[in-house]
Image (cartoon, grey):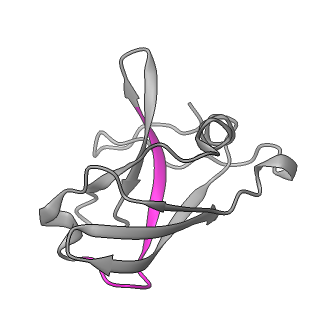
């Protein structure tokens, strides 16, 4: 994994790594939104993208930046998912900007931080 642990139990974002083929631009809809967290989001908010261990695999989690750090949901089913996971494991940092809110539906623009 590209980060180290924090006291919150969530991994930190990675640092360094080869950025050439990791300059990804992904638009995605937040999967499994946590309503209590999503209700506090606004268009333009910046969230962190991290890997959370999930059995033999890792899920791509979307986390708030302000304390208390909370999981807003995950990223799933995007065409560049494998590349995103590999780049995060290689230490590349990603962030997600909220570009659209419609009730519990959150559209994100994911890019290198």
**Which quadrant of the rendered structure holds the N terminus?**
top right
Give the vertical position of 104 relative to 89 (above or below): below
View extreme (top): residue: 56
Give the vertical position of 93 relative to 77 (above or below): below
Q: Nearer the viewer, residue 108 or 86?
A: 108
Residue 66 visible at all: no
Tell me: 21 left or right of 78: right
Q: Nearer the viewer, residue 2 or 25?
A: 25
The quarter holding residue 42 reads bottom left
Identified at 47% across, 46% down, the residue is 50
Identified at 77% across, 43% down, the residue is 17
Tell me: 68 left or right of 88: left
Where residue 25 appears, as percent x and y from the top left, is: 68, 63
Give the vertical position of 3 relative to 25 (above or below): above
Residue 88 visible at all: yes
Where residue 15 appears, as percent x and y from the top left, is: 66, 49
Identified at 71% across, 57% down, the residue is 24
Q: Which residues are magenta?
A: 41-52
**Which quadrant of the rendered structure holds the C terminus?**
bottom right
Where residue 81 appears, as percent x and y from the top left, is: 58, 41
């Amino acid at each position: 994994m590209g980060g180290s642990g924090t006291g919150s139990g969530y991994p930190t974002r990675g640092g360094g790594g080869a950025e050439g083929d990791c300059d990804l631009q992904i638009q995605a809809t937040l999967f499994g939104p946590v309503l209590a967290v999503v209700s506090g989001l606004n268009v333009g908010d910046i969230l962190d993208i991290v890997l959370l261990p999930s059995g033999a695999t890792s899920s791509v989690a979307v986390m708030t930046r302000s304390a208390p750090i909370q999981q807003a949901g995950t990223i799933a089913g995007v065409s560049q998912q494998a590349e995103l996971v590999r780049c995060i494991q290689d230490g590349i940092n990603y962030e997600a900007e909220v570009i659209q809110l419609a009730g519990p539906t959150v559209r994100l623009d994911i890019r290198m931080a």
